[in-house]
Image: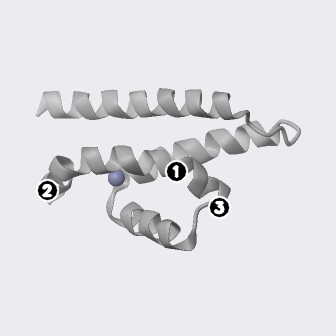
Amino acid sequence: MSTKHDRTGSHHCRRMAAVFSDYLDRDLREAICRKVDEHLKQCPDCRLYLDTLSRTITLYRGLGGIRVPKNVESRLFATIRLAAEKNKRKKRATR
Ligand SMILES: [Zn+2]
């Protein structure tokens, strides 16, 4: 069941990751938000990813309402994305 998503998922998910930052900022147009929502409903990987991301951003903002600089945010993204991919690869390798 989840194998089907695994095959098509990774590519798709990487594209999703690119919009998560905007999604969290609610800068995205409604249509895209709905698309993300729908994807999240059927993709635990992305849900976890978004959860981690949102928690990190909340943490940042909690520190006196500092707005996360764009370059920090994208570096954060790269790190989380890398971790997620490593995780995936590990999962795939053990299979
Ligand atoms: Zn996904």
In this picture, is 54 found above or below 77?
Answer: below
- Callout 3 amino acid: Arg
- Rendering coords of residue 81 (x, y %): 43, 34
Q: Residue at x 63, y 44 (%)?
A: 55
Location of residue 14 by image quarter:
top left
* Of residues 56 and 28, the one drawn nearer to the viewer in this rendering: 28
* Of residues 49 and 15, the one drawn nearer to the viewer in this rendering: 15
In the picture, the disc for residue 1 is: none
- Callout 2 amino acid: Lys
Q: Earlier in the sequence, mark 2 or mark 3?
A: 2
Quadrant containing the C terminus in the rendered view:
top left
Distance, label 2 to label 1, CA atoms, is 23 Å
- Callout 1 amino acid: Phe
Q: Residues within 10 Å of mark 3 (few under 14, many from 20)?
A: few
In this picture, is 25 found above or below 18?
Answer: below
Look at the numbered disc 2 and say if its residue's Cβ is closer than 8 Å to ligand 1: no
In the picture, the disc for residue 20 is: 1
Q: Nearer the viewer, mark 2 or mark 1?
A: 1
The way the protein has been coloured in the rendering is: one colour
Location of residue 27 by image quarter:
bottom right
- As helix, strand or loop, the secondary structure at mark 1 comes to helix
Query: Mark 2 sits on what residue?
Result: 4
Query: Mark 3 sits on what residue?
Result: 26
| Residue that protrudes farthest toward the left in the picture | 95
| Residue that protrudes farthest toward the right in the picture | 64
- As helix, strand or loop, the secondary structure at mark 3 comes to loop
- Rendering coords of residue 49 (x, y %): 46, 45
- Asked whether the beta carbons under mark 3 and mark 1 sit within 8 Å of each other, the answer is no
Q: Earlier in the sequence, mark 2 or mark 1?
A: 2
